[in-house]
Image (tube, coloured by chain):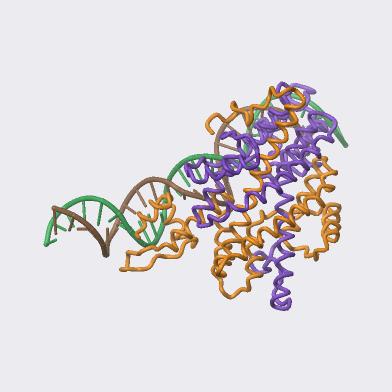
Chain colours: A purple, B orange, C brown, D green
Amino acid sequence: MRIAELSRTTGVPVPTIKYYLREGLLPAGERTSPNQARYGEDHERRLRLVRAMVEVGGLPIAVVREVLAALDDPEKSLHKSLGTIEAAIGPAEPSTDDEVAVRQAEEFIARQGWDHKPQAPGFQALVSVLATARQIGHPGFVELLDDYARVGRTLAEMDLAYVLGMPSRDEVLEGVVVGSFLGDAAVAAIRRLARRDLSARRSAEVDSGSGADDAAPEPRPEC
Amino acid sequence: MRIAELSRTTGVPVPTIKYYLREGLLPAGERTSPNQARYGEDHERRLRLVRAMVEVGGLPIAVVREVLAALDDPEKSLHKSLGTIEAAIGPAEPSTDDEVAVRQAEEFIARQGWDHKPQAPGFQALVSVLATARQIGHPGFVELLDDYARVGRTLAEMDLAYVLGMPSRDEVLEGVVVGSFLGDAAVAAIRRLARRDLSARRSAEVDSGSGADDAAPEPRPEC
DNA sequence: CAGAATGGATAGTGCTACTGTCCGATAGTA
DNA sequence: TACTATCGGACAGTAGCACTATCCATTCTG
């Protein structure tokens, strides 16, 4: 397969593929002559994965590179690769100095019986969420955490079950990537749908079903 | 309060505040003379909300403006404002023409007993997630949906319960915003923590607890 | 063998979210 | 009242990112 065909089957423009090659998101093709190369199904699959991370996950190119490096590094233990991937995927929150939020997060972790690693990406993210909630005047937000934890546990178990069904190490790791950001996106989408449904039901109860027009046609008519 | 103090209490640079004023994310201050203005706690609160949406939610400025407009518009019914906010907050996925994904999503919606609105933001997002999953070779991803739905329902009920505790319309709507993206962020963070815990436990069972160093110190030493 | 396509290098584009600079007017202090 | 800091406002400039366009010598294809 040459670059034009790779472009056709994936829908990614040729210059973009070249760019990804330059940036190391895509391994170089197999050389057939000093300035010609051939690409295989691996490239196609990898390219789709990259696009998925960029488009659905909204990950910056540099992070995609990190994730792929972790995927491709056979040195690391599975758990370690998972750690790297998780660290890369999670949005890099600026660390806060809000001690109240830190304490809340620590107490939460303790309640859950998890071991406390202050550098864990999830922990930092949680702290910054709590700090933000406090700052914008929602101190009660923290009380939702324990319920969230039940949900989060369930999700994590699902993730793991999904991933452990995979035959090879590579597929497990790719499954983690997929499960992480596709999973997050899916849960967020379904949550929205469920919220909409609930809200529509409520609103139907209250004002006999008039104003449940969904998703405001005016502000974004193009979608 | 003048602009410098607003800047000091929120940590947002003065030029950025001016920028937000220009962009209509922040209402103009109360005039005290032709070229002087005074800002109040409303401004402070609003500014923090804007920063939260931009930083935690990663929303583009234009979307923040839409959300705020919906917040401030007293014309709309509560449910309608919710719809606008949801539509704006959800990432604007490019609509796919993957009929299989569309069908999968429709069947899912039907199974859940929700009514099918093809323009609903959550629906589009779901379709694009499914399309991506299929494209990158994870056709089995769709089987997770029903379990995700249970989780999503729970979350939606929590969201609603949280929000209905608010006294005023304004606070309900702001609660929705907060619940939406802070909630998503919190669930994602907790999911990561739970996954880490599970993975560590597994890995401890298997290889007697050696390689569970968490979050790869090397790749991002600054965090 | 001619014209299209290829790999590779390098420069440029478009977008977004700020940031810097300048201005004349005003506020606070001496 | 003088004097300096700060103000609001306008507008140009910047940084970073994800591409995209152009060029070139080479190689493939009909």
Depth order, front residue of A215/A86: A86
Q: Residue at x 70, y 41 (%)?
A: A53
Q: Is B159 drawn above or below residue A113 in the view shown?
A: below
Q: Is any part of residue A19 visible from this angle?
A: no
Question: Which quadrant would the C terminus of chain A be assigned to in this image?
Answer: bottom right
Q: Position of residue A189 (x, y in %)?
A: 72, 54
Q: Relative to A61, is A33 on the left or the right?
A: right
Q: Residue at x 42, y 62 (%)?
A: B41
In the figure, residue A159 lies in which quadrant?
Answer: top right
Q: Is any part of residue A125 visible from this angle?
A: yes
Depth order, front residue of A158/B82: A158
Question: Which quadrant would the N terminus of chain A be assigned to in this image?
Answer: top right
Q: Residue at x 75, y 52 (%)?
A: B151
Q: How many marks?
A: 0
Q: Relative to A91, is B107 on the left or the right?
A: right
Q: Relative to B123, is B217 on the left or the right?
A: left
Q: Position of residue B31 (x, y in %)?
A: 35, 68
